[in-house]
Image: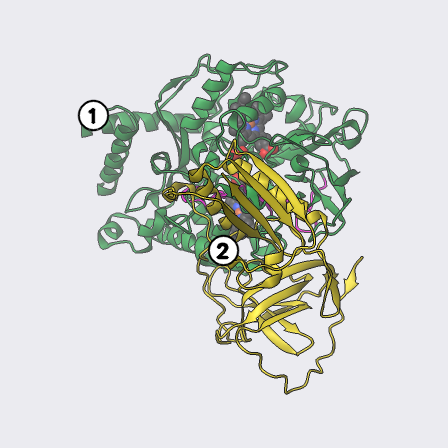
Amino acid sequence: MQAQNRTKARTMRERTLGGNLALGAAAGAVLLASAYASASEEGDGLDRWWAPGEGRTFPELLDYDNEHGTLRTLLVGGPLETDGHPFFEPIGPNGRACVTCHQPADGMSLSTASVRAQWDATGGADPLFAAYDGSNCPTLPQGERASHSLLLDRGLIRIERPWPPAQWNGAGVEPDFAIEVVRDPNGCNSGAEYGPEAGVISVYRRPRPIGNMKYLLAVGFDLDPKQGVALPRDPETGVYLSGNLMADNRVSTLRDQMFDAGSTHLGMLDRMSDEDRHRIEAFELSIFVAQQRGGGGEVDDGGATGGPATLRDSEPGELGALGFPVWGEFAAWEEIDEEDRARLTPEEVAFRESVARGARIFRERTFLVSDAAGLTTQMGFGNPFRVACKMCHNMTRMGNDVAPGQVDLGTTTLPFADHFDDLPLFRITCLNDPHPYYGRQILTYDPGFALTTGRCADVGKITLQSMRGLAARAPYFSNGSAQDLHAVVDYYDRRYNIGYSEQEKQDLVNLMSVL
Amino acid sequence: MKKLLTLLAFTAPLSAQAQEAGELVSFVSCPVYRDTDQGRKSGCWLTTDAASGQQWDVSHSPYKPNWDYAIFVEGRVSEEGEDACGAPVLEPVRTSRLLDIDCTRHMIPAEGYPGRFFIAPERYITPLARRPEAPEGPFEERTFYAFFEFDRDFLVYQYSDFIVQQAAYWIEAAQPRRLVVTGYAATDPITVSGVELAESPEIAQARAENVALTLSRLLPGMEIVTRWETGSQPMDLSDADTIPGQSQRRVEIKVEF
């Protein structure tokens, strides 16, 4: 009972902070109860799914349950009437909106659970499954489940990239590698219209979460340590570009991203209007998303500072090593005091302790990283070198990279990637210097950053994502190869021969489940 | 063309005299990673000069080895003890990676050596959020120097990037007329451990252009003239840390009023 009171009081303060509600304790609790009620109704029914053009109100505080607890989305300046709002309206001809693939219940990404529910509910008629990129290839028979297997099984959207790339960050690009298609299981990398010879390459990627964007756009330093050069600036605004958008960093601003999204995912033939662009950008910059409740109860209880409110209220762009430690939000759970122990269940106490250990493991348990192009190549760190998870996931509160985060973890490239028969396989041949680790020829499912820069040294580099809201948006990694959080840890354990104990793995999983 | 580094059998006389502190050593050899663990970046890099049979701890290099390739070591014998990594220490030291000389990956266990707890180096670029106050004048003509790994144009993290960043802060405050950026390459061949080493002439231009690009981004609107020269000679420059070869592989940023 006591626990509940505390929780409510806290959340009420939260609402007071976020908006202009100045309510007494009792009124706050009532209001809160109704907010939860509507959320959990939505959580149980079809209403989890935000369909384009529904005209719902996006509240200031929106909760959705998931298998690990509850995800919370805060909208600064909310609530927002979505009627007529370009993020929520089908502004292109294919019936989709941005929200189709960036769903509030899924941490503003898209979980395969939602994809499957939507397939089942609509018999595959939902615009999500549009032939262009919601199927394995538009040339396949669209009524069949098998033609959408990549989206249904691993949450993957087809991404069409021009080949060769022409421009990046305002400079011309001349590729130093050739690309051939070794295997084309879906037909979107061969034939008259598709594939490198036709001038387009299809790769398959997870929707990256929108939300907490100020962290992804933040710039910690004016030089890029991985490229050995200063960061480029946005030619329109003069602002430094963080280099942390999209798996392959093909765009560096929300503005350019929107043109990309509009012309591909939404099938728009015309450029988005300036007004729509500004409204979408304003929305993207005002949502903060994180898990709010997990196995240990509220994540901002007992001295911890998890959850979206802290994200909303903190300065972005800090390097954990120089300031607030990465996942220091849970430091207070390292030693839970008697009073908290008395009001929590033993399971909750144990879970909190596990999360706190997970945060330490993330920062301190080192392993030997080798052949991670981007980090072990030029920066001076050497190959191999000892790191903990936070070496790469180094931004305070967010776990993305403070510097432009293009690193080759091996998730998309052989021999390190998991094997998939349903993804296209490309052979890259480096024309000048060989790749420092893979040699002259490289087999990859997705060349990643190299599709943007045209450099064979960049093959397999994928931009680090946000680590927030993970609980709501399985599967993980840009190609959806990790079905759950355990699979993420197992991938690292295999890739770098870490030798985590089962307890350490569970601690990391528990930590990630409350981010 | 790939070369194979034939490491001479270690027939060095047992009497190989101990080298004096401050003495400059340079050689080409394969690196060995010693897997010590005192937290992040705490591993050791060892390598043996085949001519003397002496193993050195070269872990202090700002650009560390890749275990697949030979390194060109340039360093000074230091008085630091052997206790961290198990070999006498070169410091200051540089280890340039020679990608056309393959080595077999070699890792040895810590064997009781602790390695070194990572301490952020002095040349650590300043976060934007903690930019120092602008330097005060009077400002007059001044030249800054940034340094590179052998045959590369990359601004190494926590070394050259710091130098260029600090230079940019000064230049921004000084508001000069223009910058003249000159890239140098050490193209005159030298023979080290039987390997002929010479930087490619193009690297002089690439260095100048990379630094000019960086300065143009840090200082929008600044007039920057780019030049390059081969046949670079050593100079006594403090940020080259007394390594003559390092001073040859430089870019000069001349600030003109």
Magenta segment's dominant SS is loop
- The residue under label 1 is A23
Q: Is A228 placed above or below B4 here? A: above
Q: Where is residue A126 in the image (x, y as percent from the top left)?
A: 59, 20
Q: Where is residue A392 in the image (x, y as percent from the top left)?
A: 51, 49
Considering depth in this image, is A445 or A434 the residue closer to the camera? A434
Q: Residues within 10 Å of mark 2 (few under 14, many from 20)?
A: many
Check the picture and name the quadrant holding the N terminus of chain B: bottom right
Point out the residue furthest to the bottom here.
B15
Q: Chain under label 1? A: A
Q: Which residue is drawn at 54% across and 15% down?
A: A90
Same chain for the residues under marks 2 and 1 in the image: yes
Q: How crowded is mark 1: few (under 14 residues within 10 Å), some or many (20 or more)?
A: some
Magenta-colored span: A395-421
Q: Is residue A276 left or right of residue A267?
A: left
Q: Where is residue A156 in the image (x, y as percent from the top left)?
A: 62, 33
Number of disc labels: 2
Instruction: Check disc 2 and report its element: helix, strand or loop.
Output: loop
- The tint chain A carries is green
- The residue under label 2 is A388
Considering depth in this image, is A416 or B70 the residue closer to the camera? B70
| Residue A485 appears in the picture as rendered | no
Label 2 or label 1, whichever comes before in sequence order: 1
Q: Is A514 placed above or below B10 here? A: above
Q: Chain under label 2? A: A
Q: The yellow chain is which one?
A: B
| Residue B232 appears in the picture as rendered | yes
Amino acid of disc 1: Leu
Residue A407 lies in the magenta-colored region: yes
